[in-house]
Amino acid sequence: MNSTLEKPPRRKYPRISAGDSQARRVAAVILDVLSGARSVKQAAEALEVSDARYYALEARAIDGLVTGCAPRTKGPRRSPEREIAKLRTEIERLKRECERRQALLRTAQRAMGLTAPAPVKPGRRGRRRPVKRALVASEVLRSEPPAAAPVVEHQS
């Protein structure tokens, strides 16, 4: 009577899907050492690394374990694309608000009888005045003839 609602049998081992064969092998050896099934020396020989390298691998593995056990944040994850879209909409909102306030300012100025300042036309700038130092240096260069380099004769 309960045959259609039967659950599949439970696994007797944990479900581990990540990592390549080398990473899984290193993880298994580290777990053996941490459980006491192997010594550090045996683990280093099995992995064909030095004891110091084994300890470095173990530290990385424990760091990953602790990071994996940290609570995850609730809600949707932040992605850079979503953040960019949010910032763009904020920019558009602020632009519209700026234009609105500029229009309000112009309306208030007209109501008070003020005239809007004339827009500055981008035109040619006036001729640049020469710099005094540059003129002095230019005069010095023009007045002095170039000094001839001394000729040194080599005796052989």
Image: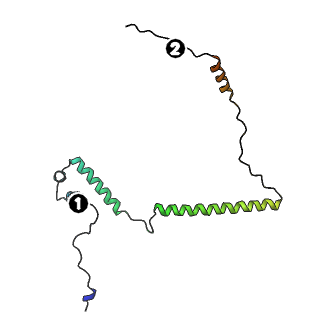
Image point (49%, 64%), residue name: 82
Image point (73%, 38%), residue name: 126
Give the side of residue 121 with respect to residue 59, left or right.
right
Residue at image mark 2: 149
Q: Position of residue 9 (x, y in %)?
A: 23, 79
Give the side of residue 62 with respect to residue 109, left or right.
left
Q: Amino acid at mark 1?
A: Ser
Res. 13 image quadrant: bottom left
Q: Nearer the viewer, residue 28 or 115?
A: 115
Residue 47 sits above or below residue 8 on the image: above
Q: Which circle marks residue 88 in the picture?
A: none
**Tag 1: Cα neighbours inside 10 Å, few (<14), some, or many (≥20)?**
few
Give the side of residue 141 with respect to residue 41, left or right.
right
Which of pointers 2 and 1 lies earlier in the amino acid sequence?
Answer: 1
Q: Which circle marks residue 21 in the picture?
A: 1
Q: Nearer the viewer, residue 43 or 97?
A: 97
**Label 1 residue SS:** helix
Give the side of residue 56 with respect to residue 89, left or right.
left
Res. 4 image quadrant: bottom left
- Kindly check if marks 2 and 1 are in contact, taking CB atoms under 8 A apart as contact: no
Q: Position of residue 90 (x, y in %)?
A: 58, 62
**Tag 2: Cα neighbours inside 10 Å, few (<14), some, or many (≥20)?**
few
Image point (16%, 53%), residue name: 46
In which quadrant will I find the C terminus? top left
